[in-house]
Every structure is written in structure tokens, then in C-alpha cells.
Image (tube, grey):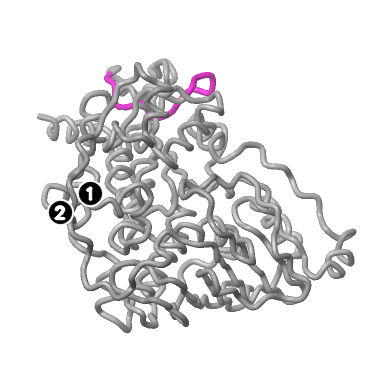
Amino acid sequence: MENSRRNFLKKSAATIGALTIVPGHVLFAKGELRNAKGELIRKATVAPSDKVNMAFIGIGNRGGQILRDFMNTGMVNNVALCDTDMGAAHTVKSIEAYPKLPQFQDFRKMYDKMANDIDAVCIGTPDFSHFPVTMLSMSLGKHVYVEKPLSRTFHEAELLMNAAKKFKVVTQMGNQGHSGANYFQFKTWLEEGIIKDVTKVTAFMNNVRRWHGWDTTIKSFPKGQPIPSTLDWDTWLTTAEFHEYHKDYINGQWRCWYDFGMGALGDWGAHIIDTVHEFLDLGMPTEINPILLEGHNPFFYPQSSSIDFKFPKRKKMPALTIEWRDGMDNLPDMPEGYYSSLKTENVPTTNMGEVKKAKLSPGKFIYSKDLTFQGGSHSSELRIVPKEAEQDMKLKLPEVPKSPSNHFENFALACRGEEKCRSSFDVSAPLSQVFCLGTIAQRLGTKLKFDRKKKQITNNEKANQLLVGTPPRKGWEEFYKL
């Protein structure tokens, strides 16, 4: 019965593309989209005067932070809470804040019961489970805000990008700095010729990671442990290959493992490389080369990684190499007059507690024809280094417009038709695919060559198979067919 209802809703949403323009008198309250007979098709758009009815899927840790950020916009109604562990300490804060709302452990059951009451969803689940939740939501006509990175595999990102176009919904990936100062500064400086002819970018994240210090000689995954009574482990796994429950898979620990997360690159790359990738029109690299993999093993990410991504010439822009560096002691080469720390705003606090900081705060160096730039992560503005060069350019720098909305406001306004999302899937899916290529190179410890037109790895069949990854578990295949 539940699957039948979801199939009905999906088929109804799919008919949207076949509808002709409907006169205004058949558009009803809350942006209901109806056909000429007045029959409800779906809530496609929220009226500008209305709040967005949003369900939150993943409400603990980072998911809880996003929930609060959305509610602070004043543009959202919270209509449902969903998490695979509604009794865990990290979900209690969200539940206590909204004790009367419908609660679910399975996003599929949430949609079976109240799909017509939801305009949009916020997805704050682990990396590997972004895909099924996002795909089902879009197929039902729901606008989606999804934490970064968009997906764990290259193929899933491709499917999500295509589905966003097919279902004509508003989409936003949660790299919140993409609505901040760096976004508008980079765009303006590029348009005005301050940033030009970039040939190299060094991106780095040298803070401690959860898996640092783990035994890199392990021969198998950890042995299973008793499943907490409040956790729906099967739904937590979603499409992933079956693993017995272990505490080092949940509550952020999933980021450590190739099977569940995207390591330091997927976690921080979206906050550091995002503007470079979009505004320099990078697309896909032709070569991904792991220069250093300290503590390499087949299960979890290395203690330190150095990966070079080579991008070809694009229009009038020269070929470019992004050098990625992570690991506490794996510092990049630094230009003259660099800053050991740059002010970075709007960076969420980690749920790892107090951690040892690296000698260099996360960020990037951008090497262009005439100037060298240094930027931090998230919305951190670029600085020209050394200071003398910045002083020389001071009077030549154009005025940069201020952001009209933060990332959460931007999504809500886009749902109401007032703005366009800055990190929609046509922007964020290709960026996430770059990370997917990088993690495949990390996992196999080998250089990869990539055909940008065919979107295939040409020199390693196993790596090419990892673009798709392991088949979904039995019972979870439907999300790849929507």
C-alpha cells in the first residue's frame, strides 16, 4: 500500500512536464498546482507571501544546526521531524524544540503519510544516504536543500543533476559560504580582470580528522556491536552495502569510511574550491594523481593526502592544476607574505569538541598571471599576497556587492520564486563529482585519467566501476529508477 501511494504521487509529479500553462484562476492557496479540472497535481511553488512548509530529515548534529538556521530565516514552517534515531542525545534538542510535530524514523513513511503537507525538505543525513532521500523527494515534487557533498558516488551526482531538471524543483547544496562574501568577491574580481589567467590553485585542510591515529594496518571492518534500541539501523544504511552496526559508523564517524563518507576532501572541498570551480568554469579534470597517501588502507581515508587535479584549457582560460593537501603535517608550499590565519565567518562548530589546530587555517592559494591570492574557507574573502602587492592594487579594486541573502534565505526565497539558488545542482553536482574522482584515486592509490566527454575513467577498469559503486541493497533499487 505504501509503495503504491508513493508510485501514485511520483506519477502525478511526472505529469507536470506535460501540462500546458494553467490560468491564474486555477492556482490555489500555498501554491497548489492543479490541472484544468481543478485536480491537485502537487505544491510546486510557494507564494511569495507564504512561508515554506519544510520537513527536516536528519535532525541531530549538523542536521540540527541547519534546522535552526532555517527557522531563524523567518521564512519557514517546520512541519515534520525525521531521523533514524529519534531517541539519541543528539536529536533531543530538535525534538524538544518542536514536541508536537509529527515524528518519523523512515523518510519513506513520512511521505506516505503527509506528502501533500510538504513544500520542501532539508536533508542533513550522512553523505552516502543523501541520494535516496533527495531522489524520492524530487520525484514527489519537493524542493530540496541537501548538505554537502551532494552524493558519495559520481553516478549518483549525475542522476540527481538530471532529476532536478526533470522534476523542475528548486535545489540547493549546503555549502553555505557560496552565498557569502567570497562568492560575490570572486565573481566581481574575475569579471573586472583582477583574477585572470589562473594556472594553479593549492587547496588545503590540515586540521585533525576523526580517523587520524587509527590503525591503518586493519584487515577488515570492525566487528558488529549491539544496535541501540532507539536506532533504525536498516533505514540508516539506506542503499549502502550491509554492515553490522558499530559505533564508529554513526554520529559523524561515517565520514571516515570509503563506504559511507567522503573524507576531508568531500567535507571541506565544497567550502574551499567552490568559487574556483564555478567561476573558472573547470568542469571535470582530465587527470587525478595521488602524490601522497600516508597511512593508505582499503577501508578508511589516509592520515594525509596530496592529490593533483589537472584541468584543460577552457575558452580563453589556460590549463589549471588544483593541488589538494590534507593531514596535520602535510602543509602546502606557501607564497611570500602568506597569512597563517584568515578570518572565516559562518563556520559551523564541530561536534568533535576541542581539536588541535594546524599551523595553517583551511583555505587556498590562487596563482594567476599577475597576482597571488589567499582565501580561507566558507565565505572568507580573498586577500592579495604579499601585503605590498595588495597595497599597490588597493585603488584598482572594484566595489563588490553585498550578498542579499544567506544560503538558507536564498533557498527559501527561491522556493517562493524570488531568487535563484546559488548552489543548485547544476552547479554543485559537478563540483561534488570532482570530489568523487579524488576519493576514488585515494581509495585505489593510483593515477586516474578521465574522459570529460564520455565521463569515464579510461586507464583503470576498477576505478571506472567505482564511478557507479556497489549495487544498492535489495529493496532499495527503486531510487535509481525514478
From mark 2 to mark 1, how far is it between C-alphas? 9 Å
Residue 135: % across, % down: 30, 45
Measuring from the top left, give residue 431's x and y in whole percent.
Answer: 47, 60
Label 2 sits on residue: 473
Q: Amino acid at mark 2?
A: Arg
Which residue is painted at 36% across and 67% down in the image? Answer: 214
Residue 48 colored magenta? yes
Residue 203 percent across, percent down from the top left = 58, 68
Looking at the image, is 98 positioned above or below residue 201? above
Please state if 109 lies on the left or on the right of 347 as rendered. Answer: left
Q: Earlier in the sequence, mark 2 or mark 1?
A: 1
The secondary structure that most of the magenta stretch takes on is: loop
366 lies left or right of 16: right
Question: Judging from the image, what secondary structure is the residue with disc 2 in?
Answer: loop
Quarter-of-image position of residue 390: bottom right
Residue type highlighted by circle 1: Leu
Could you tell me which residue is drawn at 49 percent across and 22 percent down? 51
Q: Which mark is residue 187?
A: none
Q: In the rendering, at what x and y percent does residue 318 appear? A: 62, 77
Q: Magenta segment range?
A: 39-51
Q: Are marks 2 and 1 in contact (CB under 8 Å)?
A: yes
Mark 1, residue position: 237
Q: Quadrant of the N terminus?
A: top left
Q: Residue at x 42, y 15 (%)?
A: 29
Q: Which element carries disc 1, helix, strand or loop?
A: helix
Quick check: is 42 in the magenta stretch? yes
